[in-house]
Image (spheres, rainbow, N blue to C red):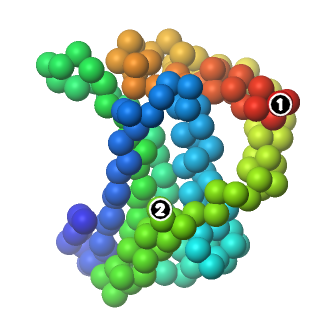
Amino acid sequence: MLYHDSPRRHRLCRPRLRLHRLPGELLPFVQLFSRALLETGAGADDFVALSQRIGRSTGGLTTAKWTSATRGSGTSAARLLLRGKAVHEKTGELLAILGDVLLAARLDNRERIRSWLVERGRAGGTAEQRGVAMSTFDCAPTFTKRAGGGAMGGISYLRFLRDLADG
């Protein structure tokens, strides 16, 4: 746990999940999985109750993907990061929420996840508007491709979502 010495005395917590052993065909699911961790509910909380609990007890909880080359090895690294922040007095609740999200996420909420696929299908037009940003994932250096950058974002990912929504 990182401790940030500020006037409000925030506590920052950043658990990381290693993705390097995940088979390549599952990499496109990382984005959906990371969203599902925070937006389908966890434990006894449905997604609305979990969102309210995060808002009430923390300074926020987010996910991010990270990919990079590893110095001198010729390999790559990929992580799914969770980032949480809370004031000192709420650190216990932040850790409890992180525990629920990581150990008891409601990943079986198919209707909610399917609605995201439909939403992304409609947003396909934004790929043309964000063309440069989207293509960056697909044209990134080799280490990013090995780490799954192209499969977890960009045009390749948009195609994956459309195929998933159609199938």
Q: Which picture quadrant has residue 130?
A: top right
Residue at x 36%, y 33% (from the top left corner): 20
Residue at x 14%, y 19% (from the top left corner): 72
- Is residue 4 toward the left or the right of residue 150 in the image? left
Question: Where is the N terminus found, in terms of image quarters?
Answer: bottom left
Dot 1 lies on which element?
loop
Name the residue beneath numbered marker 1. Answer: 167
* 47, above or below 93, in the image: above
Tell me where residue 14 appears, x and y as whole percent.
34, 58
Furthest residue in direction left, as rendered: 72
Furthest residue in direction bottom, as rendered: 89
Tell me where residue 107 appears, x and y as whole percent.
64, 57
* 1, above or below 26, in the image: below
- Is residue 50 toward the left or the right of residue 18 in the image? right
Tell me where residue 31 appears, x and y as whole percent.
58, 41
Amino acid on which the number 2 mark rests in the picture: Leu
The image's mark for residue 102 is 2
Badge 1: how crowded within 10 Å, few (<14), some, or many (20+)? few
Q: Which picture quadrant has residue 125?
A: top right
User: How far is mark 2 from mark 1, CA to CA?
Assistant: 28 Å
Amino acid on which the number 1 mark rests in the picture: Gly
Tell me where residue 49 appears, x and y as whole percent.
66, 77
* 131, above or below 98, in the image: above
One can see residue 141 in this view: yes
Residue at x 44%, y 68% (from the top left corner): 98
Dot 2 lies on which element?
helix
Badge 2: how crowded within 10 Å, few (<14), some, or many (20+)? some
- Is residue 59 toward the left or the right of residue 158 in the image? left
